[in-house]
Amino acid sequence: MKKVFGIGLLLAIISCSGPDRKPKAVARVGESYLYREDLKDLVAKGTSKEDSIAIVHGFINRWAAQKLLMSAAEVNLGDAGKADLDKLVRQYKVDLYTKAYIEEVVRQSVDTAVTESELAEYYNANKENFKTNGTLVRLRYIHLPKDNPRYETIKQKFFDFRKSDKKFWDTYSLQLKDFALNDSVWTDMEQVYAKLPFITPDNRDEYISGGKSIQKQDSLDVYLVKIRSVLDKNQISPYEYIKPTLREVILNKRKLELIKKFEKDITDDAIKDKKYEIYK
């Protein structure tokens, strides 16, 4: 209750006290009033008295500044300038309303299920439009302490990688600092640089080539890397890598087609119902 009383006292001090003051008004600019109810929920529960006062005072000052600037703009802007701005405001309202309505229609109507066959068909028909922006790599790696007692076994299993060793990796992956063993996934070079910091844009050609085996050691750790394959910039992106993008492209295409059809249908219905006509 003390916080509420403190804010109420502040409002009483900074609000108007002259003859034009209206009940429950906390501030006035010209003929515009700011009321206590306009400040409802402005201050979060638990806020200190000092912070509450600062928040309320700041809000009132900003409200007043906006009102004063608006009044000055209405006086000082020319009629032509105000007419142009009013036109923009009206158009902005139209754009906001129609955009919100169309988005809701699309949300309720568009089919968001995209089958694997649709993705593959679209990819095969448009793959030339999906070129790589940079180098892509398929690789596996592990990062482990150099004093790991099973280091030699881990290294042998890593470079002679077999699916039958899954149980081994499930057990020993807990001893690794970091790892990625699925070398069927395409990765861009920025991720490679982040995960394998000894590889940089300046020395990448030394390490990044298909089939290369890498063993990089420092004073504490060892990186073991096997490069499976490399795809250079401006090549056709692999299907698996581009699949999320394909799905978004297909969905966007559906949305645009739905919007176009919706706009045509609503116009045709208006003509049919004699709500829309063009005078010749």
Image (cartoon, grey):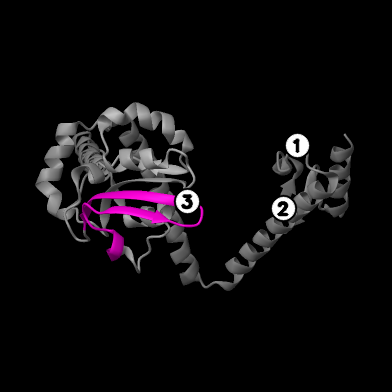
Instruction: Label 1, secondary structure: give it.
Output: loop
Residue 111 visible in image:
no
Crowd band around label 3 with a 10 angstrom C-alpha radius: few (<14), some (14–19), many (20+): some
- Determine the residue positioned at 83% across, 48% down: 11
Ranked by sequence position, the earlier of labels 1 and 2 is 1
Q: Residue at x 78, y 42 (%)?
A: 47
List x then y, in percent, for residue 227: 26, 51
Residue for point 43% across, 38% down: 150
Amino acid type at mark 3: Asp
Q: Amino acid at mark 1?
A: Lys
Q: Quadrant of the N terminus?
A: top right
Instruction: Check disc 1: other Cα within 10 Å, few if <14, some if 14-19, many if 20+.
Output: few
**Magenta residues (range):** 205-231
Mark 1 near mark 2, Cβ–Cβ under 8 Å? no
Left/right of residue 72 with respect to residue 9 in the rendered view: left
Using the rendered view, name the quadrant where residue 206 is placed.
bottom left
Q: Which residue is mark 1?
A: 45
To which quarter of the image does residue 75 belong? Answer: bottom right
Along the horizontal axis of the image, is 266 left or right of 102? left
Please state if 58 lies on the left or on the right of 147 as rendered.
right
Is 265 drawn above or below residue 135 in the view shown? Answer: above
Residue denoted by label 3: 221
Residue 79, can we see it? Answer: yes
Q: Is residue 3 magenta?
A: no
Give the residue at mark 2.
59
| 216, above or below 255, in the image | below
Neighbours of disc 2 within 10 Å: few (<14), some (14-19), many (20+): some
* Residue 226 to residue 234: above or below: above
242 or 87: which is nearer to us?
242
Q: Which of the marked residues, 3 or 2, is nearer the chain's N terminus?
A: 2
Amino acid type for the residue under numbered disc 2: Phe
